[in-house]
Image: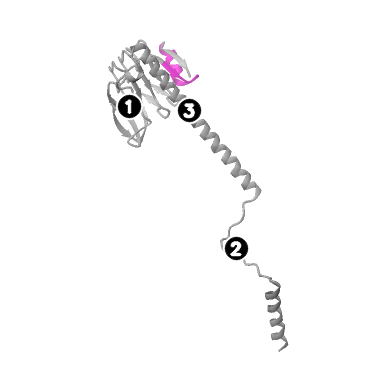
Amino acid sequence: MKKTLLLFLLCATFIFTGCAIELPDEGGGTAPDSENLTRIAELEVELEQLRAEHYVKESALAQEIKDLKAKIALLTGKEENQQNGLGTSAMVFHYKVESGNATITGYEGSATLVEIPKTLDGYPVRKIGERAFEGNTALAAVVIPEGVAEIDWFAFYDCASLIEITVPSTVTSIGHAVFDGCSHATITCPADSYAESYAKSYGIAYINR
């Protein structure tokens, strides 16, 4: 009887005083400690830096394309908006897929400026194949995107009107006679890149950018 009364009094005390028994968190989650918070902040800063670098690269490429269009307009005596085919709408790239990557095998189009796409039908472009642009006399400027690693033999052979080709740092292989017959061509490339070494070896004019 005494035990029952004691238990009743204890329960009443909890009810009237608002006391509660803490139960364990069923989610099992814990608040992030200071070390995790610091790491999260560092990753957020790193992400912002990568976004800024990407923006700078894209802006530089856009400016480079704009400069090329202006140069072509000067050489051809046409205003930029009068130059048919400057964009990519009339361009047809033939390609094959090797190990999940695209190799450009041919090109159809009369554009003065050709911006080679980074991807073709979802496949990243990694190589410009042998004789892909050979003999295209309309071609005055070419922009090769980041990611392309190889330019094969005779790829731009006898493109007599070619005056400038932009080659990124990702290109680490350029085949034999790629620019033979392109007597006015200048290679625009990063300093100390493979493209610069190639230009020096073959006596081709180059500009660092």
Q: How many marks?
A: 3
Does 197 appear in magenta?
yes
Q: Please name the residue that numbered disc 3 is placed on.
A: 57
Name the residue: 65% across, 67% down.
22
Q: CA distance from mark 1 to mark 3?
A: 20 Å
Left or right of 194, for residue 183: left
Q: Which mark is residue 8?
A: none
Amino acid on which disc 3 is placed: Lys
Distance of label 3 from label 2 (alpha carbons): 48 Å
Q: State the residue in front, 58 or 76.
A: 76
Residue 153 image position (x, y, % from top left): 33, 20
Residue 12 % position (x, y): 69, 79
Which residue is tagged 1? 88
Q: Earlier in the sequence, mark 1 or mark 2?
A: 2
Which region is colored magenta? 187-202
Can you see residue 102?
yes
Select label 1 or label 2 by which is in front.
Answer: 1
Q: Which residue is labeled 2 in the image?
A: 25
Q: Secondary structure at mark 1?
A: loop
- Which amino acid type corresponds to the residue marked 2 in the rendered image? Asp
Q: Is residue 5 magenta?
A: no
- Residue at the image position 61 percent from the left and 56 percent from the top: 30
